[in-house]
Image (spheres, rainbow, N blue to C red):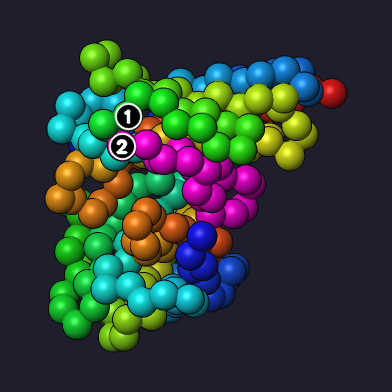
C-alpha cells in the first residue's frame, strides 16, 4: 500500500559535503524506482531513476544505489549546494503497473 | 523532461462550491494521467488514475462522486472537487507518464 508519513525525517548537512538519503521499500515485486525532489509549494521534480536489473546509476552530482536483497534504495548527492534544500521522495513501481507508490520523504537542509 | 502544467496554481473558494483543476501535458500525449493529494509535511497520496476516453480508476477510500475526473483528450485531464469543504483543502498534483512519471506544479486549494 501507500506510505504516508506521520512525520518527515530530516537530514542536515554542511554545504559542500555529500548527502545520503535512504529509502526502504516493501514490495519485492517492484522493479523500477525513482527519486524526486520537491521544493516548497511545487510539484515533485524527477531526479534519477533505476531499474531492478541495475544496482547503481549515476547522474549529474547524484548517484542512486539499489540493494534488492534488503529492499533498500539510496540517493547520494555530491558537494551539496543550498539549492539542494528540499524534500526528497523515493517512489517504486511494479512491472506492468503504471502507478507509483511513494515513500514518506526526507527533508534535506543545507547549513552554510 | 516532459512538461506538465496545472491551472490554477492556487484557488480559494467558499464551502459548498465546486472547483475545477486542469492538468495538461504540453509537449506529449498522455493516455493516462494521475491525480495526487498532499497534506502538509506528508507524502503524496494517489487519488485516482485518469484514463483518456474512459472512466477514471479511484483508489480505495476516495469518493468518485466528490472528486470528478474527466480525461477528454490526450493532453487534458480535469479534477473537479464538488461541494468542497474545509477538509478538502490540500495540495493537488497531477502527473503523466512518458517513460517515467512527470509531475505538474500543483494546485493549492483552500476552502473557507
Q: Give the magenta part as a residue range.
A: A34-51
Please determine whether, in this image, residue B1 is positioned above or below residue B65.
Answer: above
B61 or A112: nearer the eye? A112
Residue sticking out furthest to the bottom: B72
* Residue A93 visible to an observer of this rendering: yes
Q: Residue at x 26, y 20 (%)?
A: A68
- Displayed quadrant of residue B22: bottom left
Tell me which chain the residue with mark 2 is part of: A
A71 or B57: nearer the eye? A71
Q: Position of residue B107 (x, y in %)?
A: 53, 64
Q: Is residue B2 left or right of residue A61?
A: left
Can you say which quadrant of the picture contains the C terminus of chain B? Answer: bottom right
Q: Main secondary structure of the magenta part?
A: strand
Q: Is residue A68 left or right of residue A91?
A: left
Distance from disc 2 to disc 1, alpha carbons, whole Å, reads 6 Å
Q: Position of residue B108 (x, y in %)?
A: 55, 62
- Verify whether residue B90 appears in magenta: no
- Displayed quadrant of residue B43: top left
A87 or B16: nearer the eye? A87
Dot 1: element: loop
Q: Which residue is mark 2?
A: A51
Dot 2: element: strand
Q: Pointer 2 and pointer 1: residues touching (CB < 8 Å)?
A: yes
- State the mark number for residue A54: 1
Amino acid at each position: 500500500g501507500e506510505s504516508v508519513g506521520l512525520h518527515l525525517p530530516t537530514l542536515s548537512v554542511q554545504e559542500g559535503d555529500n548527502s545520503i538519503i535512504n529509502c526502504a521499500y516493501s514490495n519485492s515485486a517492484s522493479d523500477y524506482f525513482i527519486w524526486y525532489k520537491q521544493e516548497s509549494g511545487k510539484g515533485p521534480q524527477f531526479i534519477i531513476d533505476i531499474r531492478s536489473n541495475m544496482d547503481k546509476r549515476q547522474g549529474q552530482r547524484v548517484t542512486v544505489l539499489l540493494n534488492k536483497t534488503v529492499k533498500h534504495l539510496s540517493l547520494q548527492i555530491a558537494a551539496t549546494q543550498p539549492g539542494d534544500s528540499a524534500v526528497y521522495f523515493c517512489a517504486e513501481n511494479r512491472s506492468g503497473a503504471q502507478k507509483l507508490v511513494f515513500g514518506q520523504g526526507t527533508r534535506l537542509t543545507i547549513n552554510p | 523532461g516532459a512538461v506538465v502544467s496545472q491551472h490554477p496554481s492556487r484557488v480559494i473558494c467558499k464551502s459548498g462550491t465546486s472547483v475545477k483543476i486542469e492538468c495538461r501535458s504540453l509537449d506529449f500525449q498522455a493516455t493516462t494521467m494521475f491525480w495526487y493529494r498532499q497534506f502538509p509535511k506528508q507524502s503524496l497520496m494517489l487519488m485516482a488514475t485518469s484514463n483518456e476516453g474512459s472512466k477514471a480508476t479511484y483508489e480505495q477510500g476516495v469518493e468518485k462522486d466528490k472528486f470528478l475526473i474527466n480525461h477528454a483528450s490526450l493532453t487534458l485531464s480535469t479534477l473537479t472537487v464538488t461541494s468542497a469543504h474545509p477538509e478538502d483543502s490540500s495540495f493537488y498534483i497531477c502527473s503523466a507518464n512518458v517513460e517515467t512519471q512527470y509531475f505538474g506544479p500543483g494546485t493549492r486549494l483552500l476552502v473557507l
